[in-house]
Amino acid sequence: MFFDELALSDGVLDALWDMHFDTCTPVQEQTIPVILDGHDVISCAQTGTGKTAAYILPLLTNLEYDNHDPNKLNAIIMAPTRELAQQIDQQMQGFGFYVPFSSVAVYGGKDNDAWGNQTTGLQQGADIVVATPGRLLSMMNIYDVDFSGVKYFVLDEADRMLDMGFYDDIMTIYRKLPKDCQHILFSATMPPEIRKMAKAMMQAPVEVQIAVSRPPETIQQLAVDVYEPQKIGMVKALLADAKMKKIIVFVGKKQKVKDLTRELCRQGLDARAMHSDLEQKERDEVMLDFRNGKVDVLVATDIVARGIDVDDIPLVINYDVPHDAEDYVHRIGRTARAENDGTAVTLVSVEDQRYFAKIERFLKKDIERLVVPAELGEAPQSVKASECATRSGKGYSGGSRRSWRNQGGHRRKSKGQRR
């Protein structure tokens, strides 16, 4: 479907024309008409499907056509992180170039100028506020923010906000809004907590489900079966052979992130940790150094699995197997972006074999196995996805194996690193 087949305003269509956008993605095709009709919406769609435009375009159109008070806040968009709030605000400026609406991004940090600009935008009635929950709640506690004109309340990456502990903050903000406000929720996954929040907020919401897409073929997916104590040694072997910068290692728990980062630093690698215990300023500094190539290895929890715009990451290592196929797709999707090649290697412990088999069934293929270096000792046998359902944990052999070191796994580099 083309955008000009939807009931979008002329100003929005003009901006899309200038930006060379003409064809809708599936989430845009299914979600935009429902939002335009004024329904509450729950949309399950992963990052990279065009979901931001799926709510910005009808939001701008409805603001242009509906009666609203130009001197009050008219829409609030909630995002989990400063980075995503900035990205949304930038897209708002692009899509809204030809419509007469103002927006302000409200997020954490110690920049006094930013605080002043955000306060001014809130108090003087910017049409659209893009905010992280904690920062907006802080301003509500200090200033008298008038929410009486808000007609649209959007939650972007709602599952991630709940993972970061923002449920109570979101509900506190929600209770300040008019009862007839339209509620729009986007989430990559749909855990029970999301259902609970949607039930508390929404009236007869329309659900839009977009199937999780499989990883692109430009990602070389590999796995290695290991015992848990062998994981650190395997990571060191992969990093020693890869000789790359801008590598992400995804770890399941914060304490393991800290432990692995310390160990890699002891080995002389420039490794930095990224997890929810860090202050926003610290996270910003780490990500800036990572983007600029000053950090070789970013060891992170899933806090950075989505919404991080870094195009030249050649290798992603899953230190722990994610328990959900969607999380796996999000993680490895950090590599092979912007027409680059990339490699994703998953370390599969005996305890996680059943979870990885579930991922392989979702992918509809067995992931090629690497051989554990001899110096790390004997490794467990792999379990094929087709066998795991009936022989879970039995350790049957499956899938082809090859050596990362001897057969060139490290040679699949991003274009920027090829000689």
Image: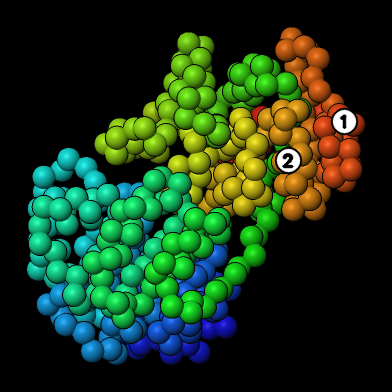
Amino acid on which the number 2 mark rests in the picture? Phe
Rendering quarter of residue 274: top left
Residue 384 on image: x %, y %: 85, 39
User: Within 10 angstroms of label 1, few (less than 14), some, or many (20 or more) residues?
Assistant: some
Q: Quadrant of the N terminus?
A: bottom right
Q: Kindly indicate whether the residue at mark 1 contacts the one at mark 2 (C-beta within 8 angstroms).
A: no
Q: Nearer the viewer, residue 228 or 137?
A: 137
Query: Residue at (20%, 77%) from the top-left corner?
Result: 149
| 226 to the left or right of 38 | right
Compare marks 2 and 1 and give the one earlier in the sequence. Answer: 2
- In space, the residues marked 2 and 1 are separated at their CA atoms by 14 Å
Q: Secondary structure at mark 2?
A: helix
Q: Does 333 appear above or below 241?
A: below
Q: Does 389 appear above or below 299?
A: below
Rendering quarter of residue 321: top right
Query: Residue at (53%, 52%) from the top-left corner?
Result: 338
Q: Which residue is mark 1?
A: 394
Residue 344 on image: x %, y %: 65, 38
Q: Nearer the viewer, residue 414 or 86?
A: 86
Residue 336 on image: x %, y %: 59, 47
| 136 to the left or right of 294 | left
Q: Inspect this view and state whether residue 295 appears.
A: yes
Residue 123 on image: x %, y %: 10, 65
Amino acid on which the number 1 mark rests in the picture? Lys
Rendering quarter of residue 155: bottom left
Q: Quadrant of the C terminus?
A: top right
